[in-house]
Amino acid sequence: MSTISRDEVARVAALARIDLRPDEVSRLAGELDVIVESIARVSEVATADVPATSHPLPLTNVFRDDVPEPALPIQDVLAGAPRQEDGRFAVPQILGEE
């Protein structure tokens, strides 16, 4: 039994402004059905005594400690900037404000 219809796929694609051909709509409807069925299958076996996990193996933090260090000199920071103004990066105006 299909849970995701072609019309639903076409509607969501239109909302997302994605232009899909009819064959792509059909293919995606089938692929989304497989995903929905897989999630339903997992939901059937998930019980209260099984803790939720994000990964099957325990993970540890592999990041280094966040230790403050002296900042780079302004000249070094701005050396590769295409434009600079008053010791700052100069970027195109986007909001139309002065």
Image: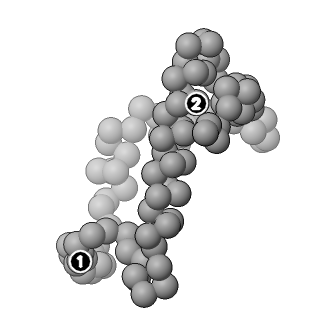
The picture places residue 49, in percent across and down from the top left corner, at: 42, 87
Residue tagged 1: 58
Image-quadrant location for residue 11: top right
Residue 93 visible, this angle: no
Identify the colour scheme used.
Answer: one colour
From the viewer's perspective, is the residue at label 2 or at label 1 nearer? 2
- Identify the residue at image location x=58%, y=21%: 26
Q: Secondary structure at mark 1?
A: loop
**Split into 4 quadrants, where in the image is the C terminus?**
top right
Of 71 and 59, nearer the camera is 59
The residue positioned 58% from the left and 30% from the top of the image is 29
- Where 20 falls versus 36 (above or below)? above
Which residue carries the number 2 mark? 29
Rendered image quadrant of residue 42: bottom left
At label 1, the amino acid type is Pro
Q: Residues within 10 Å of mark 2 (few under 14, many from 20)?
A: many
Give the image location of residue 6, x and y in percent. Answer: 67, 26
Q: What kind of element bears circle 2?
A: helix
Kindly identify the amino acid type of the residue bearing the numbered disc 2.
Ala
